[in-house]
Image: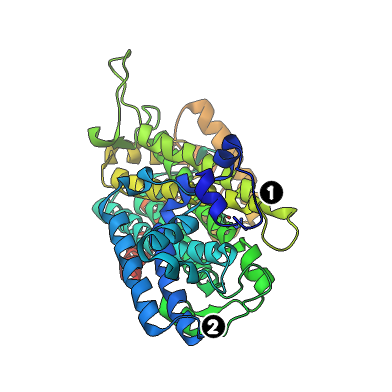
Amino acid sequence: MSKEGNKLWGGRFSGEADPEFARFNESFSFDRRLFEVDVRASVAHCDALIGAGVLSTAEADQIKSSLAQIADAGRDNPKYFDELSSEDVHSFVEARLIESVGDLGRKLHTGRSRNDQVATDLRLWLRDEIDRLEPLLREAQRALVELAEANFQVVMAGYTHLQRAQPILFAHWCLAYFEMLARDRERLIDVRKRVNVLPLGSAALAGTAYQIDREAVARALGFESVTRNSLDGVSDRDFVIEFVSAASLVMMHLSRLAEDIILYATTEFGFLELSDAVATGSSLMPQKKNPDSMELVRGKAGRVFGHLTALLTTMKGLPLAYNKDMQEDKEALFDTVDTVNACVSVTTTVLRNLRVNEARAREVAQSGYMNATELADYLVRKGMPFREAHKAVGKIVMHAIERRAELNDLPIAELKSFSALIDEDVFDALSLEKTLATKSQTGGTASERVADELKKARERL
Ligand code: ARG
């Protein structure tokens, strides 16, 4: 490693690198993930060198065919990388090229630097990964829609402060997460625009001294535009941070979904059951069925948030332009991509392996005075100001708690003793069906509303 590393700047150096420092300095053990995009970018640069008058067409053809062989070797033989050492992926590819075509290979690095190379590689790589992640999120949304459709009739308790609040449709709960993931997808698509800009041609920091047609390179690599300032082009990683930030929001949403599922799958709640395929048992307690899948998703959110903090911290004090600190961006980004991909996929699988306990969910939805707000609204309809109604119902609830009865189980005479406005029709108003049906504005949990949103959700996929 040290030997070949020194070849890159051999002229200025006479001594060998300390082996421990060489190991510390290298990034090839992880940035080999950029191998494929590094070759792709090199091919585009090679073509640009023809226009710049550095390479003849024949020379460029020879380099490109060698690069294609190098790409094949890396694709077909996983050991290719282990057998050969290099400081980083850029020097690795260049060294293989020189091995293959000799001195001609030494011309490829004309007019570029590893600084604009690595920025270009990272953008190419991340663009592909965004294009992979976005459909995974769509698949998770699809699983939510299917879960909602299959359990459309299920009513359950909605919570605030984790206290029983108001009844909702289970499908309404599913679609809440659908909306979160919809915004996550939009964010990724938006980040992608700023990822998709070409820094190659910035060279080390000042721009390239050769007549390289940067726009043509951008077109060849599928970039939307080129960076407008060479210092900025090689030295910012805001696109990485933006992606990790968008990924953090994905993880935050998945973690909340995981937490809901974990909670609802407890005996105490009992709304959901995970199938054996996505749960584990205990080595000691024979009765256990643990939601490890969802706990890991919840846990891994912390790891992605950590990467976000690490990246922001690494970047905040760096003077322009490139600094080696920035090599730290890769492991954070790679691990973020791996983690979020795995978590989205596993979550989709869990959603497809959930059984909903309709009877239990309904039982809970009908207890705990979740129709108290309904009673207040009933009094409002009869002419009482809301604040007054709220107070009156509070007293009725206190009375009902003493009586160990739900509001709709109290005799009409007792109800009337709190307000003369209460009549027989109160029982209809307090029914679970009415409680749901009144929430019929956009965004509400009434059946027709949710059915409509579910249909729209299908269309949005
Ligand atoms: N391995 C380096 C990185 O990941 C590539 C750029 C190296 N540039 C340099 N001037 N040493 O950042």
Q: Is residue 166 visible?
A: no
| Mark 1 element type | helix
Q: Is residue 327 depicted above or below 82 in this figure?
A: below
Which quadrant of the render holds ligand 1? Answer: bottom right
Give the residue type that dot 2 points to. Answer: Ile
Say which of marks 2 and 1 sits in front: 2
User: Which residue was labeled with disc 2?
Assistant: 212
Image x and y of residue 29, in percent:
46, 44
On the image, which quarter does residue 135 sit in?
bottom left
Residue that appears at 50% across and 72% down:
196
Dot label at residue 313 = 1
Image x and y of residue 136, in percent:
35, 57
On the image, which quarter does residue 382 sit in?
bottom right
Q: Cα distance, mark 2 to mark 1?
A: 35 Å
Give the residue type that dot 1 points to. Answer: Thr
Image x and y of residue 34, in percent:
44, 57
Residue that appears at 53% across and 26% down:
402
Crowd around label 2: few <14 · some 14–19 · many ≥20 (10 Å): many
Q: Quick one: label 2 or label 1, which is nearer the N terminus?
A: 2
Q: Is residue 267 visible?
A: yes
Residue that appears at 40% across and 68% down:
40
Dot label at residue 113 = none
Compare residues 395 and 192 and report the one nearer the observer.
Answer: 192
